[in-house]
Amino acid sequence: MEITPTTLFLRQAANAATLGAVYALIAVGYTMVYGIAQLINFAHGEIYMLGAFLGILFIGAGMSFPVAMLLSMASCAAVGVAVDRVAYRPLRSSPRLAPLITAIAVSLILQNVAMLVWGAEQRPFPDLRPEVEYAMPQAASADSNGEWVAGRRWLEAFDAALRNRIAAGVERRSAGTPVLPEATLRLLAENGELVGLRVSFASGTKIAASRPTLQAASQEACRVVGIPARPGIIAESRLVHWLEAPAFSVLRAVVTWKVVLIWVITSVMMLVLELIVLKTRLGRAMRACALDRTTAALMGVNVNAVIACAFAIGSAMAAVAGLLYGLYLGSGIYFRMGTYAGVVAFAAAVLGGIGNLRGAMLGGLLLGIVQVFTKAYVTDWLGIDSSYDIAFAFLVLILVILVRPSGLLGTPGAERA
C-alpha cells in the first residue's frame, strides 16, 4: 500500500514528538543542576545511559515494566547523588573550570564502567511478552487415532532439543549472555483437539535472538517423530505485548500504545516536577538557591541537600528517558549512547533558556522536531546524508542564540530553577 505524503508527515510528527519528549526529560536535569549549582553536569548523559541498561537488566530479571522503571529511577537517583557528593561537592568554591573538567572525567568513568559490565556491543531492548506459538505440524495429526500420541512425541522431542542446546551452552552471545534461557512449553488444544505449542520465556528475553534455535529445535523434533523436516513446515506466531499494539490511527498513520505511553509519562513527570518546584517546601528552597545560594544558606536552607535533591530528580528523569528510548527503538542500548543524547539535550536546555524548566521542555521538543523533519525531508531535498540532521538542529540553536542569547524562555540577567 502506497504511503501518501500526509500519512508520512503524520508519522514523522509522531516520531518528532516522541524524540522531543526524550530530549526534554534529559534537558530538565541539565537545567535544574545549572540553575541551582551553576554547574554543567556533562556526566548527565551517562546517567541516561545507565537508566537504559538498568531498565533492561530489571526487565530481564522478570520484573514488569513499571517496576523496572521505578527501580531504574531510584538507582540512577542514587548514582546522581553519589556523583555530586564525590566529584562536585568538594569543588563548590573552586573556579568553574575545575568542576567542568571533573564532569568530563566522571562521564568517561561511567562509560568505561558500563562497557566493563555490559560489554561494548549494542543490546536490544527485551521483549515485554516473550511468548511464541507454534502450530502443530499437519503430519503429526494426520492420523486421528494417533493425533495426541504424535503430538506429544513432537512436544517431547522439541522440549528435549531446546534443553540440550541450553545445557550445552552453545546458544550464547560474545557478551556471555544466554540467547535461549529456560523456557516453559505448553500444549494448546481447541475443542479437545491438539492444535499447537506455546513457548514462554522469562520476561525480558529477546525472541528474535532465539528464533534460529527454536526453528532448529522444531525441525529436529520433526525428524525424531518422522515428519519431513522441510523449511517452513512449522507455522510460528509471536504473541505481541499490548504496548506494541496500535492505539489509534490518523489517515493511516498508526500510533502504538508505547508511543502514547511515552507521551503520557513525559507529560505527567513534567507536571509533577512543575508542582514540586512551585508548590512544595523543597521547590521554594530550590528557587531560593537558584537566586542566591549564600543568602539562602543564611536563611537556614541546606544548600548541599538542595543540590543533591536536584541531582536525584534530574537523574531519575534521565533514567526514565533512557528506558523509554530503549522501549521506543527496541535496540541501540550501548555504553556510548549517552554522549550523543547528552549533547543534544544540553543544546535543548540552552535553546529553551538554561536554568528554566519550561524552556528545557520546549527546547527538547523543538530539537526533536527539527532533527526528525530534517532527516525526513531536508537532507533528501539537499542531496546530503541524513546523518547531518543534528547539524541542522544546532544551526537552529545558533540562530536563536544570536537573536536571543538567554534562550527562548530565559530571562536576561537572571537564572532560575
Image (cartoon, helix red, strand yellow):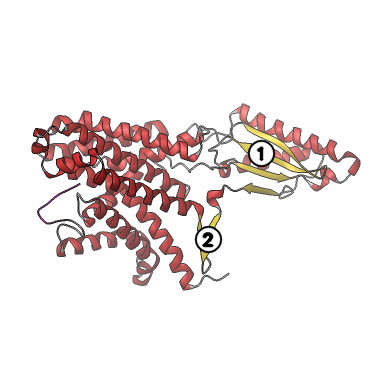
| Residue 5 left/right relative to 316 | right
Q: Secondary structure at mark 2?
A: strand
Identity of the residue drawn at 53% across and 33% down: 62
Mark with earlier residue (2, 1): 1
Q: Label 1 amino acid?
A: Val
Q: Which residue is mark 1?
A: 199
Q: Quadrant of residue 130?
A: top right
- Is 304 part of what is drawn in magenta? no
- Give the number of the disc on residue 289: none
Q: Is residue 187 visible?
A: yes
Q: Which residue is mark 2?
A: 248
Q: Is residue 40 visible?
A: no
Question: Could you say where residue 181 lies in the image, as x and y percent from the top left?
Answer: 58, 32
Viewport quadrant of the N terminus: bottom right
Q: Please give the range of residues in magenta.
A: 411-417
Q: Label 2 amino acid?
A: Phe
